[in-house]
Image: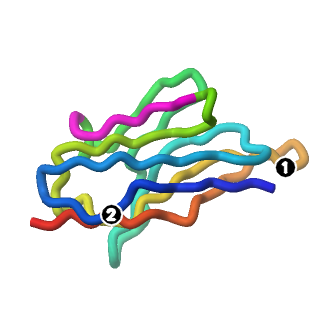
Amino acid sequence: QVQLVESGGGLVQAGGSVRLSCAAFGSIFSIKGWYRQAPGKQRELVATITKGDSTNYADSVKGRFTISRDKAKNTVYLQMNSLKPEDTAVYYCNAVVPVAGTFYDYWGQGTQVTVSS
């Protein structure tokens, strides 16, 4: 049984901070990172982290967001600082799951982040 449990979303004022958590349970190869989807827009990459802890960020969040991993807890975090109203979206955790020798994307249920101006 594979499960991604996301937490930490909520309502925050512009300029504020929020930390999202994504805990993985079951046969997951690796948590890849975070994506987000705003109303009426496509899902987009926010930040990714490799098993070797190399990170990659969308240009729109560079310098404001930090992705990190706690390997002992099998959890990936997204620290979001200096939030802007345009950061408002549902944030999804993404992982890679092995099935019969093939790897598939697996998504969490999403957590809403709303930034008020």
User: Label 1 neighbourhood size at 10 Å, few (<14), some (14-19), many (20+)?
Assistant: few
User: What segment is highlighted magenta in the picture?
Assistant: 63-70
- Asked which secondary structure carries label 2, the reply is strand
Q: Which residue is mark 1?
A: 99
Q: List the single residue furthest toward the bottom.
A: 40
- Mark 1–mark 2 distance (CA, rounded to whole Å): 34 Å
Residue in the picture at 50% in, 33% down: 49
Q: Which residue is mark 2?
A: 10
**Residue 51, how many percent across, how many down?**
60, 27
- Count of labels shown? 2
Is 96 included in the stretch rendered in magenta? Answer: no
Drawn side of residue 80 relative to residue 37, left or right: left
Indicate which disc residue 1 carries. none
- Asked which secondary structure carries label 1, the reply is strand
User: Label 2 neighbourhood size at 10 Å, few (<14), some (14-19), many (20+)?
Assistant: some
Sequence-first disc among 1 and 2: 2
Q: Tag 1: residue type?
A: Val
Q: Tag 2: residue type?
A: Gly
Q: Are marks 1 and 2 in contact (CB under 8 Å)?
A: no
Image quadrant in which the N terminus is located = bottom right
In-front residue for pair 37/66: 66
Q: List the single residue furthest toward the left.
A: 117
**Residue 45, how many percent across, how many down?**
42, 51
Colouring used for the render: rainbow
Image quadrant in which the C terminus is located = bottom left
Residue in the picture at 44% in, 32% down: 68
Drawn side of residue 113 relative to residue 104, left or right: left
**Residue 96, how many percent across, how many down?**
67, 45
Residue in the picture at 32% in, 63% down: 10
Residue in the picture at 40% in, 54% down: 8
Is 65 included in the stretch rendered in magenta? Answer: yes
Predominant SS of the magenta segment: strand
